[in-house]
Amino acid sequence: MTAVNQSEFAKILGFSRSAVTQLKKAGRLVMTEDGLVDVEASKQRIKETADPNRDDVMQRHASARGSNIEDDSDTGPGFQEARALKEHYHALQAKIDYETRIGELVERAEVERDWVEVATILRTSLEKIPDSMAAVLAAETDHSRVHAMLTEQIEKVLKQASEHIDRLA
């Protein structure tokens, strides 16, 4: 590890001292505990954090000042991966926005509220069956008739719930 002060690092790279100060403020320099610049690590970090869309400007300035940063056209994974991840999440957000606008995607809370309402309607309607059918069923002696009457009431409740679900869609 070679450690130098900022002025010497600027000379090594062929940069102005203010450019090295800007690199330091941007967090693109690796500094030692005693405040010196780690040359090799800093060169690597500068390459990793370089914007590949600006490589034409970087090369033009580097050749004009005889810069000593090796350009192997490998900007490292840092910037490219970050940009790809950012674009991926932008695309996902755009997809969510689109699907929401066309009605393919709805808020979870809205769906939960609707299904709680359906469950409530179903429960209250089913709970009413014994009250409305008790007297009628008590007088009935035919087992198949009792079964048919209960089935009819249950189907009526299920149809009511189904109609409510259809209105939600």
Image (spheres, rainbow, N blue to C red):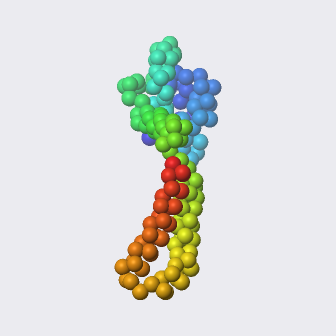
Residue in front for this viewpoint, 78 or 151: 151
Locate the N terminus by quadrant: top left
Residue 65 placement (x, y as % from top left): 51, 15
The residue nearer to you, when weighing 24 against 14, is 24
Q: Would you place residue 137 above or below residue 119 in this image?
A: below
Residue 163 location in percent, x, y? 51, 56
- Whether 65 is drawn above or below 50: the answer is above
- So how many labels did they put on this image? 0
Q: Nearer the viewer, residue 142 or 83?
A: 142
Residue at 47% across / 17% down in the picture? 56
Q: Position of residue 81 (x, y in %)?
A: 43, 37
159 sits to left or right of 19: left
Residue 96 visible somewhere in the drawing = no
Could you say which is closer to the camera, residue 63 or residue 167? 167
Q: Is residue 75 above or below residue 117?
A: above
Q: Is residue 147 visible?
A: yes
Residue 18, picture quadrant: top right
Q: Residue at x 53, y 47 (%)?
A: 106
Name the residue at 58% across, 53% down: 110
Residue at 45 percent of width and 25 percent of height: 52
Q: Could you tell me residue 88's position as x and y percent?
A: 45, 37
